[in-house]
Amino acid sequence: MTIYLDCNATTQMDPEVREAVMTTEFGNAGSRTHEFGLKAKKAVQNARDKIAKLVAANREEVFFTSGATESNNLAILGLCKHATKKHIVSTQIEHKAVLEPLAALHGFEITLVPPTASGRVESDAIINAVRDDTLLVSVMHVNNETGIIQPISEIAERLINHPAYFHVDAAQGFGKDIPTLRHSRIDMISVSSHKIYGPQGIGALIVRRRGYEKAPLTPLMYGGGQERKLRPGTLPVPLIVGFGVAAELALKHSQKRANICLQYRQQVLNGLVPLKPVIHGDSNHCLPHVLNFSIAGLDSEAAMLALKNIIAISNGSACTSSSYTASHVLKAMKLTDENIQGALRLSWSHQTESVDWQDVVKSLMAIISFS
């Protein structure tokens, strides 16, 4: 049996989530003339409350989308559509769902801050890049390739006296590093359900009010008026209900899950010792369920092929892995070409089965020796 070790790409649904999705009654949450619609609306609002609670937000600040990619686009393009300030600060290690919307903007000056060799950007570097005409600061919570946690709280604190909007792509950290996203200075948070054992195809953009005002977002689509006219379309009630249950479980079990993942991490590290892996990123600032590494003389594509019947792994972001291009994240960290080409990402969960690491080592040793 192949063991799944690609949880940064997506996670399997929790059994409680699956049950909630499968047993949710049909009904359009926008239908107010009958009981089916009213029940659907109530279920959506209940889920909205659970998601908001995870980040200490209010119900009306949660806007449902198809996932973090759409949320990122809505936060960036929706904010910039009629903006008068034309400067944005972000980082070189953002997900493509942030970098590509930024690249699509016209008439804006974009400052992309590089990370250190640790895989983290420095809060000083972010703040030093902020100017009087800066409209937006967008920094990811946790890097999807390395698992490295970025200094979001520090940046938020240092932006308190600046009017720039602060957006965080929290696809990888939502429901895992909970206290960070509760900082009231974070204006917008992009999240996906399927990263926290919820269903695929549903996410949210959380838009906090700053005092009595919130970020002036313009919708990217029109028609229907759902989500307070910011994101039209019939709400997928079963998916939203599942997302709400996933958020509720994350809040309840986050520490227990983290402890299990930390123990699993030690098993992984112990198992890989004979291969002398080079770990990428500062382990002191890494989520416990992610490991990005390379092994001397080993190409990542050859490794994944050799291991396909043992473990399912990745050599980067699932969203761009089909292009087989070198990781922009590892390039920004200034890794050697050999380490970039050989980089592998393992990501597991509290539900992941044990792996025979001796079998893994034997399979990789064989192709290293062959090469």
Image (cartoon, rainbow, N blue to C red):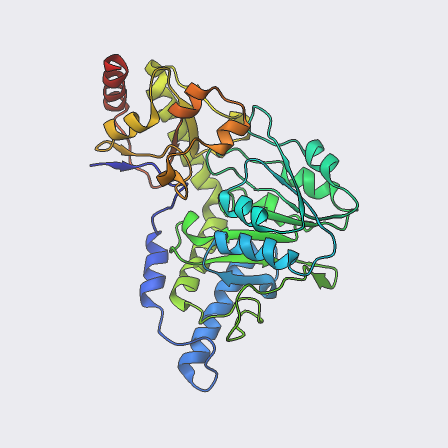
Relative height, residue 32 to residue 157 (above, below): below
Locate the C terminus and report the quarter of the image it occupies: top left
Where does residue 73 sit, x and y in percent of width and height? 54, 54
Where does residue 168 sit, x and y in percent of width and height? 59, 47
Foreground of the two, 53 or 107 = 107
Foreground of the two, 13 or 329 = 329
Q: Quadrant of residue 43?
A: bottom left
- Residue lying at 59% horizontally and 44% vertically, measured from the top left: 179
Q: Is residue 325 left or right of residue 227?
A: left
Q: Quadrant of residue 307?
A: top left
Foreground of the two, 203 or 20 = 203
Is residue 55 among what the camera can see? no
- Residue lying at 59% horizontally and 36% vertically, measured from the top left: 150
Point out the residue furthest to the front here: 107
Is residue 355 among what the camera can see? yes
- Residue lying at 77% horizontally and 42% vertically, measured from the top left: 131
Where does residue 47 sit, x and y in percent of width and height? 48, 63
